[in-house]
Image: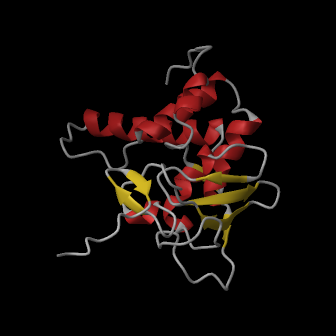
Amino acid sequence: MAKLKCPDFEKQLELMPCTGGELCDDQPCSRAQHLEAIETWLASAEQRQAADHIERVGWVPSYDAMFYAALSVQAPLSPAARTRLARRSYDIKIAPEVKLLCDERLPAGTPCDCRLERNRNAFCRLPLGGGFSRLEDLRCEVKVDDKARLVGWARKVCSGAGGTCSSESDCCPDLACEASVCAVPRPADAGP
């Protein structure tokens, strides 16, 4: 495998922080682990080709695995990049009293279940440094505790009057989604 240096390569990580980076024992795989997996695949592919096998080679490294292997050749991943990637293995904290999904019509800030288990790749897009941050395309914000390796404390995010929406659930209670904007509902016609 070529081991060429490219000074701008890690900048790509900023553009695609969560699209891959295989995990090994709940941590981003090391350079050696990436290279070993890809070298194993290459050897298998060469053996099959030499034996004139037309059948598909078993495991094919994903684009992401290849990307991170190439990235690891450049230099060790920065601490920030390693932290972001490791977030996908963090424990999820949901208070036992939380019974409502964040997709329901709830006031802003209401604790809710944001189905975090389904959205682990979004964790690494959250800013470093703590505090609450909104998860992309979801109706909630969560807090990340990198020291304790926890993500959770989800609470409802909704748009107020004038905010954008794609459905009623995007708007705070007492507002309606009209033409992709949260607004006070129009009174129903009183009729004749």
Which of the 4 quarters of the picture holds residue 49?
Answer: top left
Q: Nearer the viewer, residue 46 or 91?
A: 91
| Quarter in which the C terminus is drawn | bottom left
Q: Quadrant of residue 89?
A: bottom right
Q: Would residue 112 appear left or right of 52 to someone viewing this image?
A: right
Residue depicted at 59% across the width and 16% down the height: 8
Note whether 23 is above or below 7 in the view shown. below
Q: Is residue 44 left or right of residue 55?
A: right
In this rendering, the count of numbered labels is: 0
Q: Residue at x 54, y 72 (%)?
A: 106
Q: Quadrant of residue 191?
A: bottom left
Query: In the image, 179: left or right of 14?
Result: left
Residue 107 percent across, percent down from the top left: 58, 69
- Let me know if residue 28 appears in the view: no
Q: Nearer the viewer, residue 156 or 26?
A: 156
Across and down, in percent, residue 92 comes to 65, 68
Res. 17 visible in picture: yes
Vertical comparison of 120 with 6: above or below: below
Task: Report the colour scheme.
Answer: secondary structure
Percent of width and height locating residue 132: 71, 55
Q: Residue at x 42, y 42 (%)?
A: 61
Q: Is residue 3 left or right of residue 183?
A: right
Q: Residue at x 44, y 49 (%)?
A: 164
Report the residue that reaches farthest toward the right.
Answer: 147
Q: Closer to the camera, 70 or 139?
A: 139
Percent x, y of residue 120: 55, 58
